[in-house]
Image (spheres, rainbow, N blue to C red):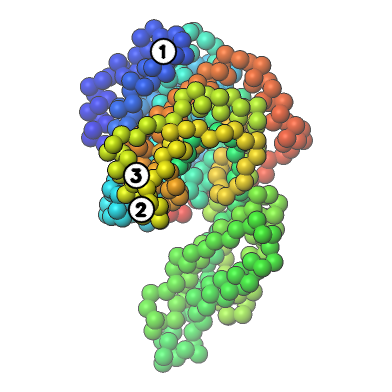
Amino acid sequence: MRKTLILLAVLGTSFYSMNAQKSEKDIIKNLEQKSADYGIIAQNIWEFAEMGYQEEQSSGLLQQTLKDAGFTIKKGVADIPTAFIAEYGSGSPVIAIMGEFDALPGLSQKAVSEKESAGAAAGHACGHHLFGTASTAAAISTKEWLEANKSKGTIRFYGTPAEEGGSGKVYMVREGLFNDVDIALHWHPGAQNAASAGAALANKSAKFRFHGISAHAAASPDKGRSALDGVEAMDMMINMMREHIPQEARIHYVITDGGKAPNVIPDFAEVYYYARHNRRDVVIEIFDRMVKAAEGAALGTGTTMDYEMIGGTHELLPNLTLQKVMHENLSEVGGMEYTAKEKAFADKIAKTLGQEKADLATAKNVQPYKTEAKAFGSTDVGDVSFTVPTVGFSAATWVPGTPAHSWQAVAAGGTSIGNKGMMIAAKTLTMTAIDLFKDKKLIETAKKEFIEKRGAHFKYIPLLGDRAPALDYRK
């Protein structure tokens, strides 16, 4: 953080001066010249490694960066202390760029090529430090273009916390904060450069809490009722249920509290579950069956059970009109070349992934355009995509072959490899935003496709219901 404060103090407003640049080419050149500066910001957030709804420093740093660039800031939107909106300009079109900044628990890692914890509670294993910073950079560059060309319109940055299971964007959508947006842009760190049609799984998650009766496990077991038995009985029934759900569905769980000592029958136990499928109606059905299993587990073990909804997200609604433009811009920006030092690092990482050496083709090139995609993960961008035409892509911020949510992803994200991928994303977002401001017909065509795919009479219903933001879900 100290590095960033010094940087901002030294550079002052010159960091954001537009130098009377008007062309898109000039704006991108100016953005490239700030690569090192944005790299410092990203690496500060990497070091903060703050989990969902706890991202005070990360959110604050991005807010200050945008404020210094001339944006107005609305803090604590949707009753979330770390959520914010930064805005420049006026009138339509309103182009939104989303940025995330939360880390994952239990994945602390140094920026080295072997597994070595940094001693923190979390790590940026999904690269959200790069996500938030690249999106911030793009919003600022787009603002510079609007200002230099005296163009009408609004560029808006959405600081969206707790994407990792906390469904931060869902509360922002539910609050109506995207209702006046024309187009929403996003991206995600990854192991390749690709801007094909995206897909994501709908998701419902909850913490199931069982309550029993404590007693001495040896002296008076008949007096006790084990809450852990309730959790284990639920887990067993859910695991049997897997045989009887659609094969595309996914169910994951972790026991977050199973008691404290073997000789004390636990009077409290908790298990945290996810249910996913590429259709939200199927997810709702599976989740309701999971609740029935929990109720049966409590009945059979003489315990009681309650549960708390933690998250819920829609699947992703693609927009091919926008996707083609995004792909063209990513292709123009292109991939990256690794230095000799970066190649040596990549080869060492590759060996930990079972590879002889790193194949850098997916970092150097852009993947061919495809109109269909298979969903593997979930994102709260899905809810945004059912509210406003939305488009995204991935940039190669990790060593090719690296899976998300791994220590290898954390490690690469803390190096120049991550920073290079971040700048690919920042340039692509900027170019796409400028295209939208220049071409109102493109926006109209995207909106027409959006209505056709979503349905003219669609009514948005959040999967997490009317609960307040789960601000303590990572505590």
Where is residue 137? Give x, y as percent: 41, 26
Asked whether, in this view, residue 295 is left or right of residue 152, the answer is right
Question: Which residue reaches farthest bottom?
Answer: 219
Where is residue 291? Give x, y as percent: 63, 65
Q: Please report whichever mark, 3 or 2, sits nearer to the chain's N-terminal start.
A: 3
**Type of amino acid under label 2:** Lys
Q: Marks 1 and 3, how far apart in space?
A: 32 Å
**Type of amino acid under label 3:** Ala
Mark 3 burial class by Cα count in 10 Å: few <14, some 14-19, many 20+: many
On screen, 406 above or below 416? below
**Type of amino acid under label 1:** Asp
Q: Which mark is residue 346?
A: 3
Callout 2 secondary element = helix
User: Would you identify the image quadrant in which residue 339 lies?
Assistant: top left
Callout 3 secondary element = helix
Q: Which mark is residue 26?
A: 1
Question: Disc 2 marks which residue?
Answer: 351
